[in-house]
Image (cartoon, rainbow, N blue to C red):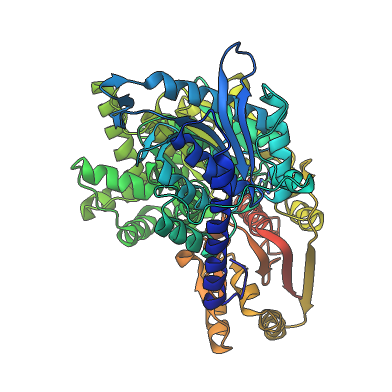
Amino acid sequence: MAAGESAARRAQRARRQERLLREQLRAAGAEARRWEAASEGEQRVAAQLLAFTERGWRLLVDRRWPGTRAANVDMLLVGQGGVFVLDVKNWRAAPEVRGDALWAGGQPRDEHARKLARVTGVAEGALVALGLSPVAVRPLMVFAGHRLAARLGPIDLLGEAELAPYLWRRGRRLSPARVREVAERLAGVFPAYQPAVVSEPARRRAAGDRPEPPAAEPGPGLFDVAAVRDAALADALAAPIERWMTFLHPDQAALVRRDWSGPARISGAAGTGKTVVALHRAARLARHTSGRLLYVTFAKNLPRVQRAFLRAMAPEVADRVEFSSLHAWAIEYLQRAGVPVQLRGEQADTAFARAWMEVGRDSRLAEIAPGHQYWRDEIQYVIKGRGITTFEEYATVRRRRRRTALRGQDRAAVWALYEAYERRRIERGVHDFDDVLSLAWERVRAAGARDPSDRPYRAVIVDEVQDLTLVGVRLLHALAGEAPNGLLLVGDGQQAVYPGGFRLAEAGVDIRGDRAQVLRRNYRNSQEILRTAMAVVADDTFEDIDGERTPGRREVDVAYRAGEVVRVVAPSAAEHDEELLAALRALAPEALADAALLCPSMRAIGHYQRLLTRAGVPVCPLENYAGSAVPGVKLGSYRRAKGLEFKRVYLPRHDEGLAPGGDGEPSDADLEQAELARGQLFVAMTRARDTLWLGSVKE
Ligand SMILES: Nc1ncnc2c1ncn2[C@@H]1O[C@H](COP(=O)(O)OP(=O)(O)OP(=O)(O)O)[C@@H](O)[C@H]1O
C-alpha cells in the first residue's frame, strides 16, 4: 500500500484496474480463438492468460522439458504475482481430490500431478541461480469446463473461472525487470518446439499485427466478474510483498531447497537472513509435505511477527505452520496431555529469595558473587537448564560461558542452595520455566518410546536456538527425531543474551557435513552500523553451540545500504533525555512507527515510558508489536528486540554497565556480567537498519 494513499483513491484505482482487465480479457478472448488446435475450453483458459500478458506478464506455451525426450510443459506464466507452471486439462469428467490423490471419472489420475510437481521442481532449480525463492514458483492444474478450487500437495487445482481471480490475488512479488529476467531464463531452460512465443503484445503491436476486433462481451464462463472485482480490490489494497519474500541470495535460495537426511543447522552473524531462510523453508516444507510444522523460538513476541511474515509470503500454507514460543508450546502440550502444570514465576521468585536468605546469603557464594541473581542464573541455566538432578553430575559439569571457577566446596554450596530452592518451590506446589520444559521433555520421550512413528510434527524449526537451554534443545530434538528435514536449528552464538550455554553434542544432536550451513552476508545493517556494533564485542570471543570458538569481530560481507550512527553526548541525564525527545519529536508519524527505543533494564523502560507519555510521544510496548505497522515508537528491552528490526533504533545511555565498575580488581562474576551486557547491546544495535542513535551521559 502506498503510504498516505486515501481509501477513496485506492478504491478508484481498483475500479480502474477492473475495467482495464475486462477490456483486456475481451481482446484476449478474440486472440485465443485463433488457437485452432485448442478446444473451446482451452481457448477460454488461454484468453485469461493472454489478458495477463497485456499487463506485462509473460507466457511461454508448449515448451520442451529438458532431459526428457517426449514430455512437454503446457504453459509457463511469469508476472508480478510470481511464476506459475500450468497444466491445462480438458477432461470431460470432473476432477476431484480424494485424500491425497487426484481422481476423475472413477480413475486415479495421479500421474498428471506427479509430472507437474516434477517439472515445477525443474523450474525452481533453474531459478535458484537468479535467487528466486521456490516459494514464488507455483504448480497449477487448470481444468477447462469445470469449477474447482482445491489443493493437492504443492499443486493448486483450479476451474477455468477461478484462474483469473487466483492470479490477481498473488500479490506483487516481481518487478517488471525481474519478470523479464525470469521469463528469459525459463525460455532458455524450457526451449520452444517452434521459435514462436505465443504472446508478446508489445512485439505484436510494434509489428502492426493487431488482434481481431474483440467480441462484444466475454462469453459465459470466461471469467467470474465478481471474483475478479474482489481480487482486484484486494490487490489494490495490499502492500507489495517485501523483496526478501520472493528473492533471496542464490546461496539462501539453495538452502531453502536443500534436502537433509537428519537434523541440520543454519548459523551466521546478525542480519544475514537466517530467519528469512527458515521461513522460506517452512513454507516450502509445508507445501511439499503433509502434516503440521512447528516453528519455535525462545522469545514471546517473535512468533507473532514471524507468523505475519509467513502469512504474507505464502498464505496458502500459513495454517499448516504453528508459531509458538517454546514455553507457551510446552505448557499447551502438557495441558493437552493432562499433565498438571503450575507455572508461577513470582512464587518461584519468592521461593528462591527465601532459599537465598536461608542458605546462600551467609555462605561462601556471597564472596564469589555477592548478588543473588548470579546464583539464581546458576540454578536456572546450569543446573536445571541442563537437566542436572544429582550433585555428582553437577560436581563435574563444565559450566559453559560462566567465568567463575567453582571448586568442590563452592559447588556443594550451590547445590545446598538449589535443594533449598526446590524444597520451597515444591512446598508451594509451583513450577518454574525450567520445570515446564523438563516435564514436556519427559512426556515427549515417553510418547516416542511407546510409538516412535507417533510424531505430532512433520518438521520442527527452531529460531534463535542459542537462547534455549540444553533441556529445551533436547525436548525439540525428541519431538522431531532424526527424520529427514525434521529438525532445523537456526541461530548465532554471538547473540546469546542469557547466561550459560551448551553444545549440541551434549543434547545428542549430531550435525554432520553439509547439514551445518553458514550465511555470511548481512542484509540489514549499513557498514557503519555493523562496525559500531562489532566494536562493542570485538574482544569477546564466543563459543557457538557446535563448540567452535570465534573472535568477536567477525568477517561479514555487507550488502550495500546507506545508514548512519548518530552519537549524542550530554552533560547530564536530563539534557540527554531532552536530546532524545527532540530526536523523536522530529519524526513524522510513519517514521516514528518504524522506530524503536530499546533499554537494557525494566527500570529504564519504566523511566522512558513515563518520559515519552508526559511529552505526548505515542508509544507502543514491544510486547504488543506483531510486525505490522502500528503507530508509536516501539519501547522494550534489548532482549525483547531479538530477531526484530527497525528503520531507526534509539539506545539511550547505551554505554553504561559495559565494563565492570568499582575501584578494585573486578571479580569473574562482574566480568561475566559486563560481557553479557555487551552481547545484549550488540543485539540491540544490530536491530537498526538506517539510523542508530546512541546516547551517553558524560559529566
Ligand atoms: N536475499 C535478501 N535480499 C534482501 N534482503 C534480505 C535478504 N535476506 C535477508 N534480507 C533482509 O535482511 C534482514 C535480516 O534478515 P533476518 O532477520 O532473516 O536475519 P537474521 O540472520 O535472522 O538476523 P538476526 O540474527 O540478527 O536476528 C531482513 O531485513 C531481511 O529482509
Pick whichever, 358 or 694, lies toward us.
Answer: 694
Query: How many marks can you see?
Result: 0
**Residue 294 to residue 393: above or below:** below
Residue closest to the eye, 545 or 265: 265
Q: Nearer the viewer, residue 176 or 452?
A: 176
Q: Position of residue 566 (x, y in %)?
A: 78, 70
Q: Quadrant of residue 76?
A: top right
Residue at the limit of the structure toward the top, as seen here: 69
Residue located at (70% from left, 42% from top): 200
**Quadrant of the rendered structure where residue 648 is?**
bottom right
Quarter of the picture holding the C terminus: bottom right
Where is residue 349 drawn, in percent x and y? Answer: 36, 59
Q: Is residue 512 left or right of residue 326?
A: right
Q: Tell me the residue at 37%/31% (across/down).
A: 290
**Residue 579 drawn above or below residue 526:** below
User: Can residue 213 be seen?
Assistant: yes
**Is any atom of residue 141 visible in this view?**
no
Q: Is residue 112 left or right of residue 539?
A: left
- Which residue is painted at 64% across and 30% down in the image? 254
Query: Horizontal placement of 582 versus 206: left or right?
Result: left
Quarter containing the N terminus: bottom right
Query: How far across and down, in percent of the image, does residue 447 sit?
Result: 26, 28
Question: Where does the image place residue 172, in percent across and percent down from the top left?
Answer: 59, 53
Does 280 appear above or below 597?
Answer: above
- Which image quadrant for residue 155? top left
